[in-house]
Amino acid sequence: MPHRDERGQATVLIVGFAAVLAMTIALVVDATAAYLQRQGLNTLADGAALRGADLGATGRDVYEGGVPEQRLELTAAHARQAVGGYLRDTGAFARYPGLSYQVRVDPATQRIEVSLSAPLDLPLTIPGSPERATIGATGSAVVGVDAD
């Protein structure tokens, strides 16, 4: 029975494990970067919604008919303007290049919803993964009247 030479078999196994380990590290790093950016966008969307609700209420309903019992009337144009100003003032466009936003005001509930999306530059790439990813976040707010 001939004797087989098994030298080099461990090298293939070590290289394979190293490749799997490198892809796992890349996946964890990319997932962490995506999570952190989404958390930042969530905070930004919440702040923009609050600013839009606060400055989007024109106060016209107060001057014309007194303080309403539930909510102030939101004006979509004022809300959009306030959200855009908030994003500029906080430096969001510089921090998240390619940032886009949408503002929706529900006239029935006087609720403002701000949706943000920004491209994510992944620190590491895994073969076969998309080269460009987009992360999004949504925040909402309603302007209420205090009973005090």
Image: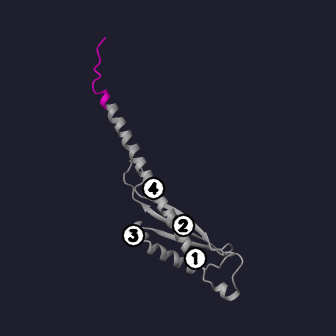
Q: Amino acid at mark 2?
A: Asp
Label 3: which residue? 94
Spatial CA distance of label 1 from label 3 is: 24 Å
Check residue 46 in the rendering and tell me which mark sits there, or answer none: 2
Residue nearest the observer in this picture, 20 or 114? 114
Q: Position of residue 16 (x, y in %)?
A: 35, 35
Is residue 115 something that shows in the picture?
no
**Element type at mark 3:** helix
Residue nearest the observer in this picture, 125 or 116? 116
Sequence-wise first label, 3 or 4: 4
Image marks 1 and 4: residues in contact by CB distance under 8 Å: no
Q: Nearer the viewer, mark 4 or mark 2?
A: 2
Check residue 54 in the rendering and tell me which mark sits there, or answer none: 1
**Side of 66 where 79 appears, left or right:** left
**Element type at mark 4:** helix
Q: Amino acid at mark 1?
A: Asp
Q: Amino acid at mark 4?
A: Ala
Seen at 31% across and 27% down, the residue is 9
Seen at 64% across and 86% down, the residue is 60
Seen at 50% across and 64% down, the residue is 43
**Side of 80 where 98 appears, left or right:** left
Residue nearest the observer in this picture, 41 or 13? 41
Image height of 70 relative to 41, above or below: below
Check residue 34 in the rendering and tell me which mark sits there, or answer none: 4
Region of the chain picked out in magenta, as a range: 1-11
Q: Amino acid at mark 3?
A: Ala
Spatial CA distance of label 3 from label 4 is: 18 Å
Mark 2 closeness class: few <14, some 14–19, many ≥20 residues within 10 Å: some
Sequence-wise first label, 1 or 3: 1
**Element type at mark 1:** helix
